[in-house]
Amino acid sequence: MNTPLVIRPRPEDVEGQPILRPLPSAKCRNVGPFVFFDHMLETTYLAGKGMNIRQHPHIGLSTLTYLFEGQLQHKDSLGSDQIVKAGDVSWMTAGSAIAHVERTPQALWDSEFKMHGLQIWLASPKEHERGPGHYSYHPASSLPVSDNLGVKIRMIAGCGFCLESPVPVLSPTLYAELQLQTATTLLIPNEHQERAIYVLSGDAQLDDTALEPHALVVLPPGAEMILSAASDCHAVLFGGAPLDGPRRINWNFVASDPAAIDEARRRWASGDWPTVPGENERIELPQR
């Protein structure tokens, strides 16, 4: 591929939260370890409203939640219970079986608030697909930042631009938030084999190609390209090393072996699964 691949996301709805989902796509199943990408669109919740995603299972992946506005409460079957605020990283590795809950903290339900952020899934390397689950929380202050000549880079996970995040990724990863002021430029290096950029807002171009806000642009492997901002621009750049083989995705399950997905579906349907302490409601297994 010598030119960037443009993927326009499909709109979805998760428990009343509108999202855009460019990955997975028929054009591109993954970028590095990233197999799933949800942009939670900026949404104003009135008093008495909020998100409440009941218990649901995962295998073979890590979830990473990163908010620009709002808060979420994360609870999981490991016993984790964490309020995640804007700029923080919530990182959960599923291993062979984990369940979690994501909801608006009770403290926000009494007044109007805004929600805006990203949630992505990274496929675990084969050697970690069946391992134990893990959760870690990384406050905004722990993430490394470069801010120079109108270009601000925050390394959410992985490494790049001489920055390295404390998030315990399982394979070579790049996940950076970019904020460019009008008329600034940024060289996108080729230090990671697979890369993609998603513009959240603003007018920008990649070399001579204009970038559409809310479109995912997959960069050619090995190419160094210039990101230019015609107005203040907010984007994320992500990718990493190629996966160690294809992955299958079925509902909330990711695996290199289809038999692992079949087993996970059977176990969740039968109730043979770790549960989140204090939680009784759950999302039932959908039809294939």
Image (cartoon, rainbow, N blue to C red):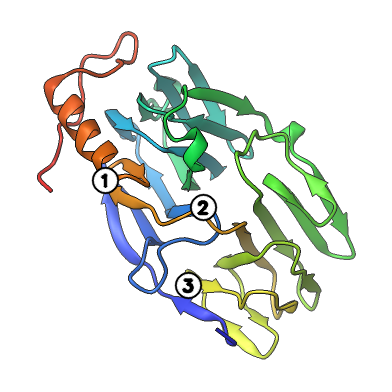
The vertical placement of 213 against 207, above or below, is above
Give, as a three-letter code, the residue at label 2.
Answer: Asp
Q: On residue 69, which mark appears?
A: none
Q: On residue 244, which mark appears?
A: 2
Question: Image point 31% across, 16% down: which residue?
Answer: 274
Question: Image point 38% across, 25% down: which residue?
Answer: 110
Judged from this view, the residue extending furthest toward the bottom is: 208
In the drawing, does residue 14 fall left or right of residue 60? left
Residue 62 visible in the current orientation? yes
Judged from this view, the residue extending furthest toward the right is: 149
Which residue is under mark 1? 258
The vertical placement of 246 against 209, above or below, is above
Give, as a three-letter code, the residue at label 3.
Answer: Ala
Q: On residue 215, which mark appears?
A: 3
Q: Secondary structure at mark 1?
A: helix
Q: Quadrant where the N terminus lies?
A: bottom right
| Badge 1 or badge 3: first in the primary sequence | 3
| Badge 2 or badge 3: first in the primary sequence | 3
Q: Position of residue 59 (x, y in %)?
A: 36, 34
Q: Residues within 10 Å of mark 2 (few under 14, many from 20)?
A: some
In the drawing, does residue 27 fall left or right of residue 176? left
Q: Position of residue 86 (x, y in %)?
A: 59, 38
Q: Secondary structure at mark 2?
A: loop
Question: Image point 34% across, 33% down: which residue?
Answer: 58
Quadrant of residue 160 within the rendered picture: bottom right
The vertical placement of 198 against 160, above or below, is below
